[in-house]
Amino acid sequence: MAENLDLFELNKNFILGRPIVTIFHNATNMYSIIRVKIQETNIQFEEKEIIVVGYFPKLAEDELYRFKGQMKTHPKYGVQFQIDTFEKEVPTTEQGIVHYLSSDLFTGVGRKTAETIVEKLGLDALTKILEDPSALDAVPRLSSEKKLHIRQTIEENLGLERVMVRLNEWGFGPQLGMKIYQAYREETISLLTENPYRLIEEVDGVGFIRADELGAKLGITGNHPDRIKAAIFHVLTNAALSEGHVYLEAEIVLPQVKAMLEQSQRIEIPYEAISQAAIEMREESKICGEETRMYLPTLYFSEVGIASKIIELKEKNKLAQNFSRDEIRKAIGDIEEQYEVTYAPTQAQAIETALNSAVMILTGGPGTGKTTVVRGLVEVYAELHGLSLNPKTYVEKDEPFPIVLAAPTGRAAKRLAESTGLPAMTIHRLLGFNGQEKDEETGREVVGRLIIIDEMSMVDTWLAHQLLKALHEDVQVVFVGDQDQLPPVGPGQVLKDLLGSQQIPIVELTDVYRQAEGSTIIEMAHQIKKGIMPESLTVKTSDRSFIQAAASQVTSVVTQVVKGAMSKGQAIRDIQVLAPMYKGPAGIDNLNKEIQELVNPNDGTRKELVFGDTIYRIGDKVLQLVNQPENNVFNGDMGEVIAIIRAKETVEKQDLLVVSYEGIEVTYQRPDLNQITLAYCCSIHKSQGSEFQTVIMPVVRGYAKMLRRNLLYTGITRAKNFLILCGEPDVLAKGLATTDDLMRFTTLKARLNPTLTTEVIEAVSQEKPSSTMELKQEQTAKQSATEQLGLLNTAESHKIGEVLPSNLTTETAPYIHPLIGMEGISPYDYND
């Protein structure tokens, strides 16, 4: 078998040559395009030079490299050699090795020293030095500094190629291989040989199955502890990212881990081995636990941190500076007179509550005046505190603006800024995030006196914790949101838990004001919010309609509606098609292509840039998919393609695409085009926090498994002026009648209000996923292992709702309020 593999390797296509020029190099993912002068090859190619593409670092020009891969014909750029692996051609003769070691690469190593190294280590000297850091100890009269310099130089010049070749042998392609190398550098082989499962935690794109395949190649099989721990981590991570859970009960985790391990390798894994691995992970701080609940540490400490900060703010509510009702009412009256507005009693109550609270929640459905309250609160706050709302005033004084407005998405922040006339930004930008942070790296303080966070329903547990821990101790916080919208994409349900805890002042706006303007969209949305099926669901009104259509007809209906809206003067940027799925004739991908052909076709003379299955043209509406704080562009932002620049027109010889996001221009190189997509149609999740003049929303049977009341409610409430639903009425009705039964497992509500502990935990126990119910034949063994996990507690003395010990230790610190027992005491009490 080994002989066959060697024969295959010998017959693999290769090019031996020297790089002439680097045409393109992406320093982030290492995607590179170079021109190579061919010295030797086993492929039929008559030219003396060839374009080589793949994932590799910048290569030294005029050095000799061996590239292995296959020939490809690019539809635009012609013949290219796409590499799987590459390595620098190293000398194999005594004279060649001596010449290499005495070259300018090795400062202070002369020919005589090089000859001594070869004499002592032989013709495989370079390999020995790479594989054994102590190999140079056999060479006399070499100082420690010189040994280190020689070894590091060889690793820098030959280590990468060696690692990439080994990773290729292990089944990792060049792109993922380069990402793995960037994580571990020259220690890649040794670290992965010791524990291949660390890839799951430390390298994006590697899941349990891939790591387990490598583990099997390295002899890690069966109930090896590293293998079981990796499966536990995978189950908890998948539950957080795919289902939004902050924790899982052990009786859910154990059977899932067992099934995964036994499916990957046909070896029975006892429950006791899984529970023992979980206990060891707790001791290693790889997971956290309370009773039989299992958490990823980042989510556990985020939830504990949120609860701690909210309790701190709640305590400050009692000590907060209170304005009298007369003062507040007078200020509100002044603002009403100045801006010719009238606040309803509940809106005035919301402003008063916010002014006299360290933390409060403003909630309500669409059209209830949340924006009006926020605008009024800002004005009244400034009036009572004698503050200017002109940002220039603070710039001149070199002082921070006292009112901070933020939202989870760029579009939501833009709406907040427009409604208040004040600066607003995304939470990520407020915290200075670039998307690459580790937990321990986030320590930025948010400076401001009044913090207003809009669209709080979109904020997940991790982001909420980062935000709250960045707040100054004297701050006042107002959370604004609608809990009936979709939960966050990330884990947790912070707004819902804060509301359910009954520990924070809440003002819910219920009176609908936009309805007075004749909005039947708002009327229908509130009926849906209350669980009432609108009788006029398919009845045409002045601002909404329902067009019956099968899935095969949806594309035609949608394009006709778009065409009709544009013929009446609406711009395509104000028309948004929303769908819950990407695939199928009524899916996002197909609808984007069809609408693009309608509103932005190519007559044969226009520039195009093809990336995968997507064609981009100047004028296309696009959606940003990742945060780019350095460009002030964030996930969910929509823009327009304003330029396409051909490779032959640039110095770098690469295609460029320029997008304008409300005047902010961002340039994308070809490898970066996975950061955007066409946006004529987008998912309802991506639209959250946005508002459009016209929303077109197909609802067909192919969507049925995804349709829930909160999804449809979120989509419908994106429409400001016109809503066109199309599809099958019975599917829409069934979706509206289906509540979100995918309960998220969190303990934030119980941490904030221990009296709710029993209610919360019982609710969770009644909502076990079906996978748990399907494994009852193993209940005895599973129950025993679950009981064993009673040893899992992160703080052994603590259970949610129990009285805490009076002594402060590292174990109890996360649960003990820092000001406990300090009521009414200030630092001034200790002054002489």
Image (cartoon, grey):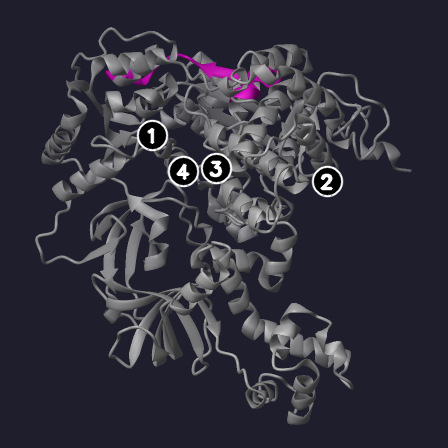
Inter-mark Cα distance, 4 to 3: 9 Å
Circle 1 residues within 10 Å: few <14, some 14–19, many ≥20: many
Q: Are marks 3 and 2 in contact (CB under 8 Å)?
A: no
Q: Are marks 1 and 2 in contact (CB under 8 Å)?
A: no
Residue 739, picture quadrant? top left
Circle 4 residues within 10 Å: few <14, some 14–19, many ≥20: some
User: In terms of depth relative to the viewer, which is nearer, 824 or 814?
Assistant: 814
Q: Residue at x 68, y 80 (%)?
A: 121
Residue corresponding to mark 3 = 406
Amino acid beneath label 2:
Glu
Q: What stretch is highlighted in magenta?
A: 496-520
Q: Are marks 4 and 2 in contact (CB under 8 Å)?
A: no
Which label belongs to residue 684? 1
Q: Where is residue 145 in the image (x, y as percent from the top left)?
A: 74, 79
Residue corresponding to mark 2 = 284
- Horizontal arrangement in the rendering, residue 587 relative to residue 297 (left or right): left
Amino acid beneath label 1:
Ile
Q: Residue at x 17, y 39 (%)?
A: 595
**Which callout, 1 or 3, points to the residue nearer the camera?**
1
Q: Can residue 450 be seen in this view?
A: no
Q: Where is residue 567 in the image (x, y as percent from the top left)?
A: 9, 35
Residue corresponding to mark 4 = 417
Q: Earlier in the sequence, mark 4 or mark 2?
A: 2
**Which callout, 4 or 3, points to the residue nearer the camera?**
3
- Horizontal arrangement in the rendering, residue 735 relative to residue 393 (left or right): left
Inter-mark Cα distance, 4 to 1: 23 Å
**Which callout, 1 or 2, points to the residue nearer the camera?**
2
Q: Which of marks 1 and 2 is nearer the N terminus?
A: 2
Inter-mark Cα distance, 4 to 2: 46 Å
